[in-house]
Each structure stands twice: as structure tokens, then as C-alpha cells.
Amino acid sequence: MKRKRKIAMLGGAILLSTGILTPLIDSPVVSADASVISKPSISGFISHDELTRTLNQIEKTSKGNIVVDVAGYSNHGREIYKATVGSGDKVVLIQSEIHGNEKVGTKALLNILKEIGNKNSPEMRQLREELTIVAMPMVNPDATELNRRGNEMTWDEVVEQFPQLDGVAPSWNYYKYTNQYWDYASNPGFDVNRDFNPDLDYVPQPEDFPNSSSDPGWFITPESQTIRDVYKDLQNEFDKVDVFVDLHHQGEYVIDGTDDPVTFSLSGVFVPDPSTPEGEKYREYADDYDVDFSKQLNIAAYDALQQMGNSPFGNISLYPQDLDLPGTALGAFALNGSGSVLFEITGQTQSYGQKKLGQLTKAVERGLHGILNSVATDEVYDLDVEDYDDIPLTDR
């Protein structure tokens, strides 16, 4: 029987910053000459073809523990996969690479699947018995192949799908700029992680464009539609998605008050609390929203990393908290009752060598295991919510 808990909720305000907003490396600094674009190398990272082969192999070697399905297709017809492991009634949905140049999370997620699906230790058996884990690695494969943040899609393609938007100004998250890394001007696309709406049945309406970052999105991209549909299917089957984790990258920062470089940042707050005056516009979601549970999940990840001691994995910080981002998957799903966790891994694809990337991958795996184990054992509910505010801040 699914465990449900009403916990007091805390609030936030509005802040526009980098990371799940717009990483510095993908900001629209316009170049006059698109011919000088120099894309960062992605050697050593997983391509979509490699993802397909790896997931097939994981499924085969799991002896029935893992089932891999095609959940949908990108705008250019690439498969968006979901891999399911476990048969428990507590549901955990984890996704990676909704921004195609944020790649470490995909490797970590595949390693987690292999471990849970193949190992028969008491810990892995407990995870499979208590949880249903649905992993969606590389949910924006067109962007992955281009090594960029946005997908590959024109506004005309949106209007073709939604004729009611003919003549409407494109959404604010439509990229058409050129800078030293990307030429969106000749190959436009959308920030898919601004295309979500807490109303999971929302149909695009002309009056809701172009909107802004503090407004809900529209489900106009096939990538966001696929993630939404997986989420809704899990809701229908299990009543709710208990946990949602989104794996991202950010710029390079240090722990506030130190010179220690951040390994990654965590957060469980993406919109103002619907029960507060600041969150009044989300009032209809107040009964489902559970920010304390989100904070407990973040504490579980943080504590797991701290147990590794003084190591490259220890510098975990708290992402900026005063956010109002209902168009993100995290914001939309949190309003639908999921305990939500953001991982913002340091750097981008071009920043580090393989040794450093391997360390970051292991750190993400450790944090994810902290979440999964605490939910499987119910220990997450005993964590002190106040400890969330003791996580050191990021110096931004």
C-alpha cells in the first residue's frame, strides 16, 4: 500500500539565474559570422546509437529484471526510451539529458540500471521489491546529437501540429540565435525543459504565448509530450509518482564562503508554495504539493555523499531557492505531488577530461543511491527537514 503523508510546506520567491534556467555556455551572445562556430568535442560521451545498444544489452543481461520500451519519439524520429526495474508500489521516475549538452547524468543513470538489474545483493533486491524505478536516459536525443541545449524543431512545425497557433508569436523559449558554439538561426529549436505545464491535460491556447519563464509551458514539443505521457501513465497505474529526479549540468561555481569547487548542486524548490501568498496562482495544487518530502529526498542524496568523507564528491551545494519555474518538468511534477530533486552537475561537455567526468558520474550515482535506498527503507521520512537549509549555498 502506498505511503502518503501530509507535511507542512515552506515557500519561495522569484529568481532568475543560470543552471536549469540558461547555462552561461548557451546564452545568446550573437556572432556576426556563423562560419566561425566551434562545437565542443563530445568524444567519450554516449550517442543515441550507443544508448540503444546499451539499453538492449542491459535488458538482456538483467534476466527479466529490466524492461526497456520506446516511450515516444523525438521531433526527428529518434527513440525516447524508458527502462523499468522493480515491482514495488513506490514509484521513482528519473530522467537525464533534457538538455543535450548535459551528458554525465545519462552515464550515471545507465550504471544505476545495470547495478540494480543485475546484482542480487540484499540491497538491490530490496530496491527491486520496494520500488518501481522508471529511468528515461537522454530524453532529448536530437539535442544530444547536436551537443546543444535545445531540440531541433521550427515554429512552423509547432503550428502544423497545433493549427490554433497560426499567427501567434513563438514561445519565449524558442532559440534562433547564433553564438560561438551553436547556430540556432539556421537550425532553430526549443528549450524542452520550459515546455511543461502543471495541468497535464493542457492543450496549447493562443493567448498563452509567448509567456515567460515564470509562466507554465505548453507541451508543444514531442519530447515534453513523451515525458508527460510516461508520468501520466504512472499516475494512472500507481495513483502518483512518488519521486521525480532530473539530472542537469550548470556552470562552474564554488561553495559559498570558500574556494572549494562545487561537485554538483541540489534543490527541491522550484515554485512558490501554493499555500502561501507568493504561490497563490498555484492554489489548486496546494493539496498535492509536498515540499518537505522534496527536501527530505535532497537530504538523503546529500547525506550519502557526505558519508564518502573528504573526497572529490564532498562539495555538494544548494541551488538557488527563490525560483518560480512552472514550465520545468521539476516544477510541474512537484505541483502534481511528486517529491522532486534537481541535480546540477558542475561544468558542461567541453569542460573536463575523462578522469574528472568519471568522478562526477560516481558522485551522481552515489547521490541517486542515497535517494533510492532511503525511499525503499522509508528512512527518508525520518530525516529532519530543517537539515535541508544546512546544506551549504552555492556562490553564484
Image: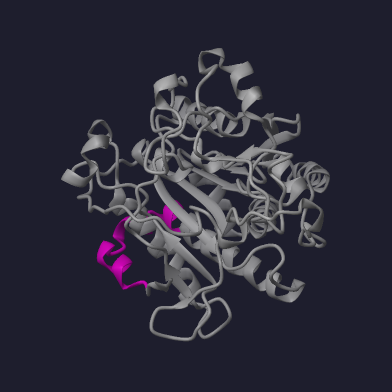
Estimate the x, y position of residue 20 in percent, counting from the top left.
Answer: 50, 53
- Asked whether 324 or 373 is in front, the reply is 324
Considering only vertical position in the picture, is 365 above or below 160? below
User: Viewed as shown, does residue 355 lie left or right of 189?
Assistant: right
Considering only vertical position in the picture, is 32 above or below 66? below
Please identify the dominant SS of the magenta region. helix
* Most distant residue in the left direction: 277
Estimate the x, y position of residue 345 in percent, counting from the top left.
Answer: 56, 64
Image quadrant in which the N terminus is located: top left
Whether residue 324 appears in this view of the structure is yes
In the image, what residue occupies the spot 68% across and 44% down? 184
Magenta part of the chain: 374-391
Total numbered badges shown on the rendered structure: 0
* Most distant residue in the top direction: 163
Residue 385 lies in the magenta stretch: yes
In the image, what residue occupies the spot 53% across and 40% down? 173
Estimate the x, y position of residue 44 in percent, counting from the top left.
Answer: 80, 62
In the image, what residue occupies the spot 52% across and 61% down? 344
Estimate the x, y position of residue 334 in percent, counting from the top left.
Answer: 38, 42
Image quadrant in which the C terminus is located: bottom left
* Most distant residue in the front direction: 32
- Asked whether 153 or 3 is in front, the reply is 153
Residue 75 lies in the magenta stretch: no
User: Viewed as shown, does residue 49 lie left or right of 345?
Assistant: right
The color scheme shown is one colour
